[in-house]
Amino acid sequence: MNDGEITQKRDRHQLGFWAYIMTDCMLFASMFATYMILKNATAGGPGASQLFDLGYALLLTILLLTSSYTVGLANLALHNNRRKEFIGYVAATIILGVSFLVLELREFAVLIHEGHGPDASAFLSAFFTLVGLHGAHIAVGLLWAIVLAWALYRQGRHEDIKRKFGLFSTYWHFLDVVWIFIFTIVYALGVA
Amino acid sequence: MEWLIGRFDLSYLPSDPITMGAAIGMPLILIAIVAALTYFKKWKWLWTEWITTVDAKKIGIMYAIVAIIMLIRGGADALMLRASTAVSGPGGTQLFETDTFQQVFTAHGTIMIFFVAMGLMFALFNIAVPLMIGARDVAFPFLNSMSFWLFFAGMILVNASLVVGGFSNGGWLGYPPLTELQYNPGPGVDYWIWSLQIAGIGSLLSGVNFFVTIVKCRAKGMKLMKMPIFVWSVFVTTVLIMISFPMLTASLGMLSLDRLAGMHFFTSDAGGNPMMYINLIWAWGHPEVYILVMPAFGIFSEVVATFARKRLFGYKTMVWALIAIMFFSFVVWQHHFFTMGAGANVNAFFGIMTMVIAIPTGVKLFNWIFTMYKGKIDFKAPMVWFMCFAVTFTIGGVTGVLMSIPAIDFQVHNSMFLVAHFHNVIIGGVIFGYLAGLTYWFPKLFGFRLHDRLGRWSAYFWMVGFMLAFMPLYALGLMGAVRRLDHYDDPAWIPFFVVSAVGVVVIGIGLGLFILQIFYSVWKRKTLRDTTGDPWNGRTLEWSVPSPAPHYNFAIEPTVSRIDEWWYQKQDGVSVPKDKDYKDIVLPKNTSLGFLIGMAALALGVGLIWHIWWLVIVSFVGLVLFVIRRSMDDFTEHTLPAGEVMRMDREARGI
């Protein structure tokens, strides 16, 4: 492939990825709409203000926002061809992402243990699905980051990895934005 | 045993004679196909030429084959329904049990929309779009193959339900709470959910793929306002797909969580809200009908301009009409349930929006008529399909506007009047359009035309059959017949139902003629051979390459400077390319991963339907590994040297 064709390919992948992100926006929008409609349908059980802890959610937010920062740094390191630094920042991102997921799952486990599982009411179904959908996206992102880091380690074909890591960081920032909406709508407005 | 086969047991095998016949027939056909492939030693050919292909044209042909087979299946369902209502009046007998009847109409609707209309649509996208914009292939050839195999997996699930477990009885949109576990514990609804979910994700990915193809892969000089109208229609359709299909994914996902994890999104207890589902699914469903019909508008725009030998009247208004429909299609969904009780103001808004959306549609019809005006019209089969469309679709449009008035809708809601209306637009608009499109682009794919007279007769039979089958339903609707009715007590309805059944038979003859036309044309292919590559004296780029189109589409990348480029190039005189004009071509390599991902999705669906958890885990892990495997593949392309391209091109052109 010549340079023109490589640029063309990168353009296509970038536009395609943004288009995919737009479809994902619609998926989350559907879930947010459902959550808003069902948030008072607690079937006599406790509502958002009794169940959620804003401090805990803030901790999750800080973890995720920090991971977005490290992804940015990783991207920068990759473009400056500093491989070790890149691997370090990716590792930091993965650790932050995993901690986020573990804490989120712990929150889920506590709720389920106390009898407020997703089958308790329409409100809790919507909560678990909306937040869980975001969590599943994070899990996919973590797997993707590991695969990319491994690919770089294995073959070191820079141009391709640069392009793919660029897409990954777009994805990761997008999940951050979605989380900010979750934090605001589910936790902050729920507790208030 | 439960860990191995989930909730399956022998009681899920069919017991009544009709499903038994189908259940035995389908595996027999499958065995016959396998035997034939083995006997003629065609397995390798099937694998290398078709299953692993990433060539958009071949993927398009596979979509078309699946869709036409599904058209036969859905048509058989329709025949069963109308045969049943023809004899189930007062004093008559029901041909099947009520539950079977419900499964049949659910399967009919699901198959016709998702696997016939969507299938034919993606077939024509694949066949025509890259060629019309002067591209070698779509933007993401691998994704394209994967989308097809996901569509295929969904199709297999719908049909497998006939053999094991039965299908959903909840209607083509599966309204809860009827489709919830409480009222529908069996696997039928799960078949419906997972076949649509898997096929739907394929459609979504195709939407992204063609969007990027049209934005990024157009020939040099082809500005947006110089694209053929069919490409424009595909472009707005892909935008609709990208915005609306995630809502389908979400609604189906939530319904399946209700059923699998005991959640309460749409249940009738614990705060669940069934109307939430109905809003969500129609927020997808209304754009979906425009997704289906807009490409048909695009096809007719090409067909009318070609066969009237005139430039399309009002190109710009055509484009703006498409864009207007794209926007308005998102603000009319509530007209599907005016009776929900949203209140007078909400109903008035959606009613008015529904009337407004008829305007751009009307604009298009006038544009086609003005294109024909003073044209030298050649009534080939695609043009006959257009004439049938113009009449039928207009009637359907008028009854649609009629129903957009909430007060009238309250009277005819969920009646046979509605059934007549949407068949009027879906058969008259979508099916006529796609059959016209298949006829129109057939020579580009296979190198010979379809037999014209048989094609025209097929259109006439479809048209007459359509009128017989659906005009009585308008009357029945006004007389009070509701849809999905398996027996009735009013003797006055009998003649209408009988005429309707006759109509279905006539449509069946039309479909038979269409299929006969394909086989007859294959037989007579020598006399129908298209030697020029331009059998209709066409206007757009696809007719500038030899027929059948080479797998690289264009030996030399075309340059465009105006609408209907090829038409004007022909008048200027086409120059023969010189040796140095040929360049190396980079082509995507075949891959089996699209197929494997589709099959893993199929296994995942089976596991989720039957609660076979080990299969769910294995197929899910497989799916993830296949995707990772593909992302690791660095050498997905190969190069065709310029000399080779030159040799092949000159041979095809007979130079």
Image (tube, coloured by chain):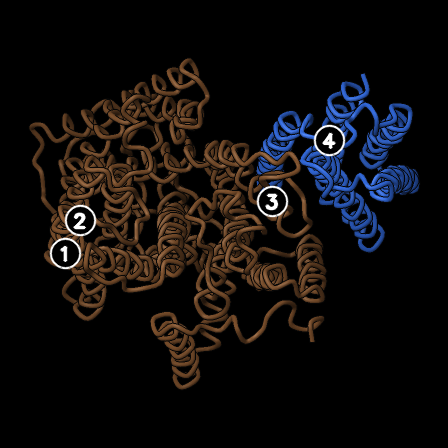
Chain colours: A blue, B brown
Give the quadrant of residue B325: top left
Q: Position of residue B564 (x, y in %)?
A: 27, 33
- N-terminal label among 3 and 1: 3
Query: Tag 1, which chain?
Result: B
How far is disc 4 from disc 2 in space, using C-alphas?
A: 51 Å
- Camera-near label (4 vs 1) is 4
Sequence order check, earlier mark of 3 and 2: 3
In the picture, the quarter occupied by the N terminus of chain B is: bottom right
Q: Nearer the viewer, mark 3 or mark 1?
A: 1
Residue that label 3 marks: B253
Residue identified by numbered label 1: B502
Q: Residues within 10 Å of mark 4 (few under 14, many from 20)?
A: few
* Nearest-to-viewer mark from 4 and 2: 4
Q: CA distance from mark 3 to mark 1?
A: 40 Å
Mark 3 belongs to which subunit? B
| Rendered view: B520 above or below B250 | below
Residue A45 image-quadrant placement: top right
Which numbered mark, 4 or 3, is in the foreground of this view? 4
Q: Residue A44 got which mark?
A: 4
Please name the amino acid that badge 2 sits on: Ala
Q: Secondary structure at mark 4?
A: loop
Which residue is rendered at x = 28% and y = 23% of the image?
B358
| Residue B469: mark | 2
> Against B75, is B42 above or below?
below
Whole-percent x, y for residue B281 in the image: 49, 37
Q: Is residue B127 depicted above or below B233 in this figure?
A: below
The image quadrant where one finds the C terminus of chain B is bottom left
Q: Is disc 2 in contact with disc 1, using a CB cutoff of under 8 Å? A: yes
Q: Amino acid at mark 3?
A: Gly
Q: Amino acid at mark 4?
A: Gly
Whether residue B555 is visible to the viewer of this picture, yes or no, is no
